[in-house]
Image (spheres, rainbow, N blue to C red):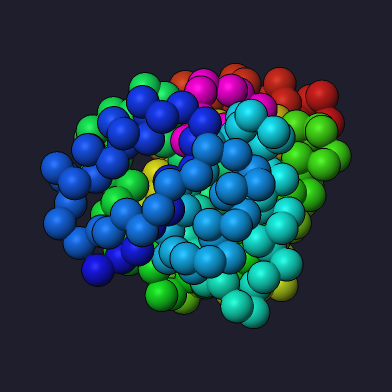
Amino acid sequence: MITALLIDDDKHLRTGLKALLERYTNDIFIVGEAESVKTGIAAIEKLRPQVIFLDIHLTDGTGFDILERISKLNDKLKAHVVFITAHEQYALKAFRFSALDFILKPVDPEELQLTMAKIKEAVGKNNSFENIDLLLENIRKKVDNFKRIALSTSDGIHLFEVSDIIRCEAKINYTQFFIKNHKPVLISKTLKEYEELLSEHGFERIHQSHLINLSYLKSYIKTDGGYVIMADNAHIPIAQSKKEKLQELINSL
């Protein structure tokens, strides 16, 4: 059984989430509940849950205050954190860059089931707190132009400078990252998700299967249907519908 702790200042939400968890999964055990930063920290230290469902806004502070504390317990606590949040663009972007799970309010049963499936695979494997440290770093800076990104693979969490990503390639429902001075990294998320994250960082989707960092573009070849040559010498095709925009972007560099 996977042990879980619910931290939210809304008793009705805790009750509803608990009911949904009991209905849609039979291998999670709620070991406790808390409604504030103070009681949440005390419950974590006492109960040592494997999963923490954590609200952002609490009566005496934020979920980030709790993270500041539990990140210092890294050697003792191995917990998977799932945020419960309203639709706050800045926070959602920070979660995605940090490879952290979140559930939007009101809680959707289907979304909860998908999250639980990920948790079952992650618990006991990805015990690194590096992605939480990255989230806290981004939250402290209060900027949305994040410099680093956490990529969660089957063997753990890996942090990279966004500026070191050369290109991304779709592999059905996976995305393969090609990174400067590093072997390719395969992530179980779609290319569309990373297009949304990286578009403000100089990345352009030039083909259904390819997202490139324009900083690493070496050549634009207009013959043979049109393709670009990247810094890693990869030849990437250009979709017909993307050629005009790519030319405009190149002219503006």
Outermost residue, bottom direction?
Answer: 75
Vertical placement of residue 193 versus 155, above or below: above
Whole-percent x, y for residue 102 in the image? 46, 40
Q: Nearer the viewer, residue 110 or 21?
A: 21
Residue depicted at 72% across the width and 26% down the height: 249
Taking the image as shown, residue 94 lies to the left or right of residue 122, namely right
Q: Nearer the viewer, residue 71 or 236?
A: 71
Whether residue 207 is visible to the viewer of this picture, yes or no, is no
Whether residue 2 is visible to the viewer of this picture, yes or no, is yes
**Residue numbers of the magenta segment:** 83-92
Taking the image as shown, residue 99 lies to the left or right of residue 63, namely left
Q: Nearer the viewer, residue 112 or 196?
A: 112
Whole-percent x, y for residue 28 in the image? 26, 58
Residue depicted at 53% across the width and 57% down the height: 43
Q: Is residue 87 magenta?
A: yes
Q: Is residue 96 magenta?
A: no
- Quadrant location of the C terminus in the rendered image: top right
Q: Quadrant of residue 192?
A: top left
Residue depicted at 36% across the width and 58% down the height: 31
Residue depicted at 22% across the width and 38% down the height: 19
Whole-percent x, y for residue 232 in the image? 66, 63
Q: Quadrant of residue 131?
A: bottom right
Give the number of marks: 0
Vertical placement of residue 117 versus 60, above or below: below
